[in-house]
Image (spheres, helix red, strand yellow):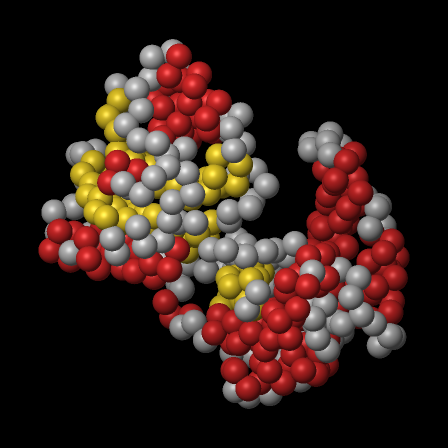
């Protein structure tokens, strides 16, 4: 296993990457390195054997100017522990430079390497990562992202990587997602790091490997939400801030646009409009905090994923969405499939302060369930209208009737 880190945007990206590698030191102790790209598309790098603190000094970071940087800490799984196999790889080719930091194993690397060598490629290391660099250099596509897609085509294994081509920073993982990547913002730039964990609900709820995690997930999810909701909204001037009424209007307009009335949905829209809760102080709302979007390891919650629906609003929206029946994945426990509502709300109160009104949270649970039902409709019509033909979308569309039953049971307090 190795640690990889990438930064795009901030001044002195190498210094931020240097700090990032300290946080990933546990992922590899054999060697460490950083490559930075300056405004003239000049790439400079350093690689040293040993720990980050031993080989990469803060003073050395001053010579690595630029707004793009990638870093790597190595634990060898393919190739010997030598400076030649230290990363990031930095290579020059006809289009400029390629810098790559890779974690994982490429199971058909030897076969690909043999073909490349037969066609004239000369390798400078014994690590499997170098085959990606050679394939990038041979890519016929013009744009960096297309070059990377072409280079990874036909490569098997479990991997993730960050790569700088010119002034473009790219991140990729294997198609099965065995080596997930986490993306986050830092002022005007973005930070990427790889984290271990699992997201598949079936495994999280049933595998012995996660037995310990299941015992602590409710508390840890509550604390994570409290931390999200404490984010100062004054620092988020561009975040959307839809009102409850506008969210209902948007959802109902989408539903009516399909031209297929669902009487249960119409009933629930009226139920919600008659019970809009009093306004709370606006907070940062994740918008999709649920089982399936949580990265979990054996110890508990490792990361919160899928931030594309973030907005300002009622923090209890996140609590209600976490309890939506669809996100229990067959479990009888309403809070994400891992606990009861009372324990979840109590844990949130301890972490956030204040109190949770169960009726207020129930409003958002019903709202979230209706929202999921309209999403199921949208998936079905994307398939039926030929915009995105997919067996998966058709199957999700069939769940509309399941959501109708969930909504009726929720209104009766039976779910």
Which image quarter holds the C terminus?
bottom right
Say whether residue 241 is visible. no
Rendered view: 290 above or below 93: below
Q: Closer to the camera, 268 or 134?
A: 134
Q: x, y percentage for residue 103?
A: 42, 44
Q: Closer to the camera, 193 or 145?
A: 193
Residue sitting farthest toward the top: 119
Q: Which residue does the image show at 85% across and 59% down from the upper left?
A: 404
Left or right: 406, with 188 as reference point: right
Q: x, y percentage for residue 388?
A: 69, 33
Q: Which residue does the image show at 53% across and 76% down from the upper left?
A: 223
Numbered marks: total: 0
Say whether residue 264 is visible. yes
Q: x, y percentage for residue 200?
A: 65, 54
Q: Quadrant of residue 248?
A: bottom right
Q: Closer to the camera, 8 or 72?
A: 72
Q: Which residue does the image show at 13% across and 51% down from the upper left?
A: 60
Left or right: 195, with 24 as reference point: right
Rendered view: 295 above or below 337: above
Left or right: 245, with 158 as reference point: right
Residue sitting farthest toward the front: 80
Q: x, y percentage for residue 269?
A: 78, 63
């Amino acid at each position: 296993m190795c640690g990889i880190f990438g930064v795009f945007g901030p001044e002195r990206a190498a210094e931020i990457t240097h700090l990032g590698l300290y946080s990933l030191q546990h992922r590899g102790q054999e060697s460490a390195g950083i490559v930075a790209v300056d405004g003239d598309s000049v790439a400079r790098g350093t690689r040293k054997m040993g720990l980050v603190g031993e080989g990469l000094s803060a003073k050395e970071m001053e010579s690595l100017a630029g707004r793009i940087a990638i870093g790597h800490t190595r634990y060898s799984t393919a190739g010997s522990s030598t400076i030649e196999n230290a990363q990031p790889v930095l290579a020059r080719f006809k289009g400029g430079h390629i810098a790559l930091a890779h974690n994982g194993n490429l199971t058909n690397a030897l076969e690909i390497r043999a073909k490349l060598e037969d066609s004239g490629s000369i390798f400078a290391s014994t690590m499997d990562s170098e085959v990606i660099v050679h394939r990038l250099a041979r890519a016929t596509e013009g744009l960096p992202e297309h070059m990377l897609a072409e280079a990874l085509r036909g490569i098997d294994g479990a991997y993730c990587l960050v790569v700088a081509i010119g002034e473009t920073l790219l991140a990729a993982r294997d198609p099965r997602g065995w080596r997930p990547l986490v993306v986050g913002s830092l002022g005007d730039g973005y930070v990427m790091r790889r984290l271990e964990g699992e997201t598949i609900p079936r495994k999280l709820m049933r595998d012995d490997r996660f037995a310990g995690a299941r015992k602590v997930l409710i508390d840890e999810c509550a604390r994570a939400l409290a931390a999200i909701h404490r984010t100062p909204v004054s620092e988020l001037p561009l975040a959307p801030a839809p009102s409850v009424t506008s969210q209902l209007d948007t959802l109902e307009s989408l539903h009516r646009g399909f031209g297929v009335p669902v009487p249960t949905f119409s009933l629930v829209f009226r139920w919600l409009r008659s019970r809009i809760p009093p306004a709370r102080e606006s907070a940062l709302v994740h918008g999709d905090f649920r089982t399936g979007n949580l990265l979990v390891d054996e110890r508990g919650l490792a990361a919160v994923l899928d931030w594309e629906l973030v907005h300002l609003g009622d923090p209890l929206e996140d609590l209600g969405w976490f309890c939506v029946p669809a996100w229990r994945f067959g479990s009888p426990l309403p809070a994400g499939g891992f606990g009861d509502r009372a324990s979840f709300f109590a844990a949130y109160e301890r972490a956030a302060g204040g109190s949770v009104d169960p009726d207020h949270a129930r409003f958002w649970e019903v709202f979230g369930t209706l929202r999921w039902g309209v999403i199921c409709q949208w998936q079905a019509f994307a398939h039926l209208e030929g915009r995105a033909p997919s067996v998966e979308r058709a199957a999700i569309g069939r769940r509309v009737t399941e959501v109708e039953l969930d909504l009726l049971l929720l209104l009766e307090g039976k779910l």
